[in-house]
Amino acid sequence: MMHADVLPSTFLGHVLPGCAFIAWALYWAVHAIVGGQNGPPSVSLEQTVFLPVFKVTVALVGVWVEIPGEGWYPQDVMMSWQHVTMYSVFGLSGVVDLMARRGLLSSGATYVAYAAAMVNSGFLFWAHSSHGGVEGLVHLVLALAFFFAAAVALVETLRPSAGLAWGRIGAQLVLGSWFVVGGWILYRSGWDLADPARMGWTYMAFSWTAIGGSVVTVGARLAAGARSGA
């Protein structure tokens, strides 16, 4: 059970990264559409300086939000530090992007850093799945979404393609959306998180989230294709 005093910041701790991941994925998609990008992607993960700076800035804000305050229970403190770690590794991936732009690291390092941040975060949220019930299921699905996005990025380092780039965009869009939906389920829905019936609803909520993310991604790719053929 979460301490009542930390519920608002714990909910924010899910919505903030969720919105950041969504904004990041949508930026990729819009950039691809505007550029008519439906062919082989750039050798570097981030093609503009905006996103690396965005990663570092959001990481700093996220760490500040998640630092535990007085009166937190030990379990809450541990979970908060896991969120702090997640923000930190993505902030470091932004630093890698900036170093690659200056020629200090290879462009492939940007994909590896992104994948490493995804795997690290997935590992941390996998630990949350041991709680069982709806809470465990929400975090298990979240961990799997992190691992899937990491796998796509790693394959991109070997065989970059437009299809994989769009797959990465879609995976991150679903990941971010599930952060928000999962946060609502855990902290705002009022559900009995130990009710087995709510487990079924949680599976269905993710199904809807995945469908929505797929529709947006496919639509964006079609728009990019149409623009490149114009």
Image: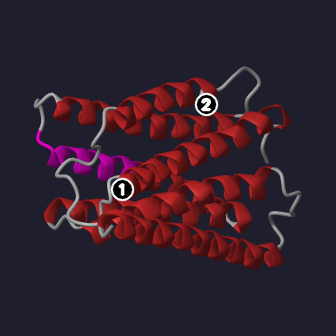
Q: Residue at x 55, y 31 (%)?
A: 62
Q: Which mark is residue 66?
A: 2
* Amino acid type, label 2: Glu
Task: Confirm whether residue 124 shows in the render.
Answer: no
Query: Disc 2 on helix, strand or loop?
Result: helix
Q: Residue at x 55, y 34 (%)?
A: 81
The image shows residue 157 at horizontal and vertical percentages of 18, 59
Left or right of 45 in this view: 69 = right
Examine the structure image and report whether residue 125 is included in the region drawn in magenta.
no
The image shows residue 200 at horizontal and vertical percentages of 74, 79
- Main SS of the magenta segment? helix
Task: Confirm whether residue 195 shows in the render.
Answer: yes
Of the pair 158 and 68, the residue shown nearer to us:
158
Relative to 167, say whether 108 is above or below: above
The image shows residue 71 at horizontal and vertical percentages of 77, 24
* Amino acid type, label 1: Ala
Q: Which mark is residue 32?
A: 1
Of the pair 71 and 145, the residue shown nearer to us:
145
